[in-house]
Amino acid sequence: MDRPVTFAMVGAGQRGFTYGEWLAAHPERARVLAVAEPRTHQRDAFARFHGIPPERAFASWQELAAAPRLADAAIVTTQDSDHVGPAVTLADNEYHLMVEKPLAPTEAECAELVRAVTDAGVLFAVCHVLRYRPYTRLVKGLLDGGRIGDVVSVQHLEPVGHWHYAHSYVRGNWRRSDKASFMLLAKSGHDIDWLRHIVGRPIERVSSFGSLTHFRRENQPAAAADRCVSCALEPDCAYSAPRLYLGMLRAGRTGWPVSVITDEITEDGVRTALRDGPYGRCVYAADNDVVDHQVVAMEFGGGVTATFTMTAFTPHQDRRTQIFGTHGYLDGNGEQVTLHDFVTGEVSVHDIPSEGLDAAAGHGGGDAGLLDAFTTAVATGDASHILSGPAESLESHRAVFAAERARLTGTVQTLPR
């Protein structure tokens, strides 16, 4: 293709804007020609940013799908439960597709979506952005190069962060499994998929334990109010909404998460949102039901084992991974990797490669890496650039669903081969 790849954005929320910013920053490679978004403010802001005329700024994905094909590819960043409809229809309309994870809230819908894009023969990428990080490339390169021998087991931690958990999973859009999806799918599907990618073998058996332990009504202090702005205990609460959002605003941080709670990015706008909206609720008086900690044990093909821990009760920081091999040990923190060689006794520290993608960008460079790979795949027609295609992405989704069944039933779940 000797012209920029053209895109339609389905969903102009935080993820849609993030992906759109990368596309706009690479006009020689990509152009956004259309948007579908039901919220007027977000739709108009996105259209202005990309210079999209009113006739290509649609109030629904159905309106976009009813128009003649407007672009080479579409990016679907709607809420989790709204992925299948636009993805299936746009695949039938011959749009190449990039779809935010998780694909859908149910295993059957995930399979339906993957079957539809496979039958349509379009290029397809799932937004498992951790696969595309420069850090991931470093870790996988060391493992594939045999630097620690054969991988035997893995220990992986996702430290969600106390305020991030309160923002997204107590007060926010992903607080309820019936409104979005369960926690492991909504947040940690990234990590289960990343482990599948790093180990390089299919997940065969899983078990899991976890619960919603802390963010419950019975843990609300007796003197607490149901809203932070009227609570006498707010100044000393670890989950104070005014401290979080007003503190970020005063520090000059006007994007996520402040931009999620209000369209008016001012102190008055934030205060109004905390007084009237969901993000000002006491974390012990919301309607949340997703777990705040969970452990998953996995057995991969060939007997490789892994444990994964998701917890809300940490600072907001990068994942940490320890990988145990027959000839060495790898310890990674998202910024660098320390490798212990059992043969030589050498301990070496490996920094993230500086060339190529910006590791400081979203998801440690994963957002940029995904868009770079997908844009290249569409431009060249070569699906090998995509690290998160239909079959393996469906496989890792199925492992997540199996892990949740294991948690709910107290069983070990075996995945189909």
Image (cartoon, rainbow, N blue to C red):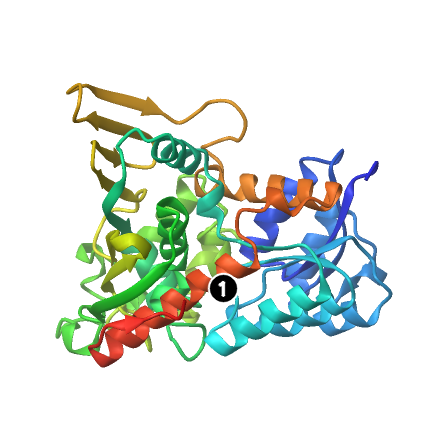
Which residue is found at the position 38% from the left and 35% from the top?
144
**Residue 406: x %, y % from top left:** 26, 74
Q: Amino acid at mark 1?
A: Leu
Which residue is found at the position 52% from the left and 71% from the top?
110
Which residue is found at the position 44% from the left and 24% from the top?
353
Placement of 164 over or under 85, stated as above or below: above
Placement of 86 over or under 73, stated as above or below: below
353 to the left or right of 99: left
**Residue 69: x %, y % from top left:** 83, 61
The residue closer to the viewer here, 115 or 16, is 115
The residue closer to the viewer here, 82 or 389, is 389
* Few, some or many residues within 10 Å of mark 1 (<14, 14–19, 20+): many
The quarter in which the C terminus is drawn is: bottom left
Which residue is found at the position 49% from the left and 59% from the top?
393
| Residue matched to label 1 | 394
* Helix, strand or loop for disc 1: helix
**Residue 256: x %, y % from top left:** 47, 50
Q: Is residue 279 visible in this depiction of the protein?
A: no
Farthest front residue in view: 302
The quarter in which the N terminus is drawn is: top right
How many numbered discs?
Answer: 1
**Residue 398: x %, y % from top left:** 42, 68
145 to the left or right of 295: right
Q: Is residue 271 visible in this depiction of the protein?
A: yes
Specify the quadrant of the image occupied by residue 331.
top left
268 to the left or right of 280: right
The residue closer to the viewer here, 300 or 68, is 300
